[in-house]
Image (tube, rainbow, N blue to C red):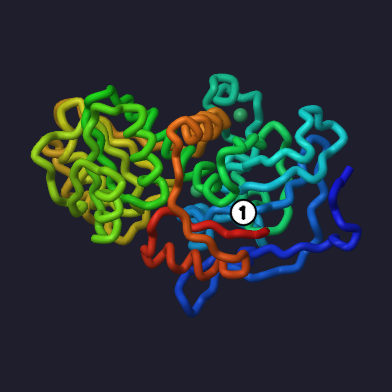
Amino acid sequence: MIEEMNEAKVNMRAMRIHRLGTINSANPPLEQDFIPVPQAGESDLLIRVHACGVCHTEIDEIEGRTPPSSLPMTPGHQVIGKVVGQGPACTMGMVNKRVGIAWIHSACGECQWCLGGRENLCPDFIACGRDAPGGYAEYMTVPEAFAHIIPDELGDLEATPLLCAGAVGYRALSLCRLENGQNLGLTGFGASGHLVLQMAQHLYPNSRFFVFARSETERAFAAEMGATWTGSTTERPETGLDAIIDTTPAWLPVLAAMEALAPGGRLVINAIRKESADQDILVTLNYDKHLWREKSLRTVANVTRSDVRECLRLATDIPLRPHITAYPLENANQALLEMKQGQIRGAKVLQII
Ligand SMILES: [Zn+2]
Ligand SMILES: [Zn+2]
């Protein structure tokens, strides 16, 4: 079943999480292991990984806010690679195709959420790189139905951030229910923010875009990308905003965003977990200032396959070109540490071949 695989290639390199703990320069979170190439199950594809994006969620996994379901675990959920093998029950003719694998490694297909088009909320949701081994490795497997064909226009490296930052950003943008001409805010401007801004500029050409970011570098980057207004997290533009997407790990930006919303405005929090460092600020929540006049708040959880596929389609239409910084697989610890320290400009990607 395995094509193009050298007989000698029975082992592979993987950068894996062995224990949970706080990431800092004295405590590299991943270890390089030499482990057997995985076998494709009945309905699985075997993927030769070309590249894998680095996401803030890996930090949440390692630091225990959304821990792996078993250890050691190979993280990574923005994977581009080539299908080099398949299980006997596969029927989609995917061998030799270039595919992407996103955070959704599988869902049950039978529950009310799966049947209702919201497989992102499935109670049996399996997250790639948290509940099943992901792409910080030379090979991985995925159920055939959860691999996404990557359009030829997109290179390996630039396609990786579309699978998480892009797809979840697309979902967050859809939940904003923005109309062309309405004001959109983004608080935080990392990998997802810079993709959402480009998607929003394409979908809502008459809208204005406001970027709130803590760091001067992020604000300069947002201005370069065509944001109408940039400011610090707590600065207030003169006009109210119809929707805001929050991609920060903190609570201050949530309160600041609720305050900046126009009547009827929607805040969508796009973060798998919030950190607890500034949680105390929530006691200053003020009904009149933050909630009154039908402001609403919702979160975005996971992604569906259609979010991923619509984001890929939009990316080729625009065309969307993510800014990326590449690292070799063995430098994954450095990439994670830099991300944790807030050295974010565009997206970080591990280049595996
Ligand atoms: Zn991610
Ligand atoms: Zn389900």
Provide the residue designation for mark 1: 51
Say what amino acid the circle numbered 1 marks.
Ala
Residue 80, horizontal then vertical, whole percent: 63, 47
Within-10-Å neighbours for mark 1: few <14, some 14–19, many 20+: many
Q: Nearer the viewer, residue 105 or 150?
A: 150
Residue at the (49%, 79%) spot, across then down:
26
Q: Nearer the viewer, residue 111 or 321?
A: 321
Residue 332, horizontal then vertical, whole percent: 56, 66
Residue 114's place in the image compared with 168, above or below, is above
Residue 175, horizontal then vertical, whole percent: 37, 29
Q: Quadrant of residue 184?
A: top left
Q: Residue furthest left?
A: 238
Would residue 326 be found to the left or right of residue 110 on screen? left
Would residue 219 be found to the left or right of residue 319 on screen? left
Residue 170, horizontal then vertical, whole percent: 43, 34
Q: Quadrant of residue 91?
A: top right
Whereabouts is ligand 2, in terms of quadrant?
Answer: top right
Residue 206 visible at all: yes
Residue 120 visible at all: no
Residue 309's place in the image compared with 328, above or below, is above
Query: Which SS class for mark 1?
Result: strand
Rendered-image quadrant of the N terminus: top right
Rendered-image quadrant of the C terminus: bottom right
